Image (cartoon, helix red, strand yellow):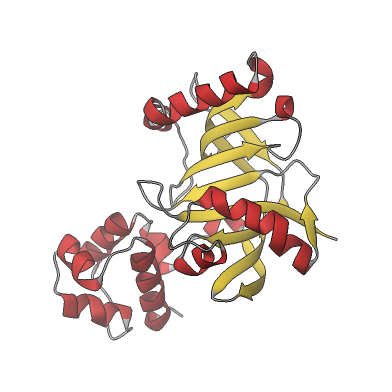
Amino acid sequence: MFDQIDFGKRLKEFRERRKLTQKEAAVKIGVSEQALSKWENGVCLPDVYHLKYLARVLNVSADCLLDTENDGGEKVVDTIKVGGAVFEIVEKPETVFAGKMFYAKDFSDISAFNSAIDAFAADGEDAVYDLLTDAVLPVYDIHLSVNFWLSEKKRAYGFVREVSAEAQPEGVDVYKMPASLYIRAYTDKFAAQLLAKEQCEIWELFSYIRDYFMPAHGFKMADNGAQELEVFDSSDHSTGYAYMPVQRC
């Protein structure tokens, strides 16, 4: 049975992730602030027309707002709080990513590898995303860090999105990630406070998770080939989730 109270909670969560006030979101959707407040409080539901615009403004799918999709098959098996920050322990199935991959072994040194990544981030990311087929909804830009805790020549870096099919157009790289356990954390103010900052970027959470959270809670790095993920839920890449592949000690 569909629960409109739960829908309202999801709607509010996604709005706050986008750093929009009720008034700002209402203006973008073309409704009154009071109407949006009623939706978030579970008093009533938006019609199909406004649901479409809600999804567009919040950069999620309508299925995600309605909680009618599979959410990529991920399963939260535990939740641990540190202060106000929430760390979720997630089982993530085998996943196929597509986009542009850079491999350190293909460059003369690590400086050339890093320069190529920076240049692509500035000019090429949107172009490769436009080539992808069979993208999984909701669509998120993802930065994939491969073996960054190992020797430099074993490293790789990807600008990817999750797709449902390995067959992709020419010029698109495919990377298959094995199923794994992950620690997932969001770049909210509570996570930033753990770093003594007012706000933080996703990559900054990896060091905290590896150096402090994992030893304190009985985790170590996964050795199954799973890799670190920066999953952005905003178009400017200012917010999103850190996924750290782990196994229990």
Residue situated furthest top in the rendering: 108
The x, y position of residue 179, in whole percent, is: 71, 49
The answer to whether 196 appears left or right of 18 in the picture is: right
Residue 130 sits in which quadrant?
top left
Residue 220 sits in which quadrant?
bottom right
Please name the residue shown 52% across and 55% down the image.
241
Res 160 visible: yes
Residue 65 sits in which quadrant?
bottom left
Q: What is the tally of numbered marks visible in this picture?
A: 0
Q: Is residue 169 above or below residue 18?
A: above
Please name the residue shown 40% across and 77% down the image.
9
Q: Nearer the viewer, residue 196 or 111?
A: 196
Image quadrant occupied by the C terminus: bottom right
Please name the residue shown 68% across and 37% down the image.
148
Res 172 visible: no
The x, y position of residue 207, in whole percent, is: 64, 52
The x, y position of residue 90, in whole percent, is: 66, 62
The answer to whether 199 appears left or right of 155 in the picture is: left
Q: Is residue 200 above or below residue 45?
A: above
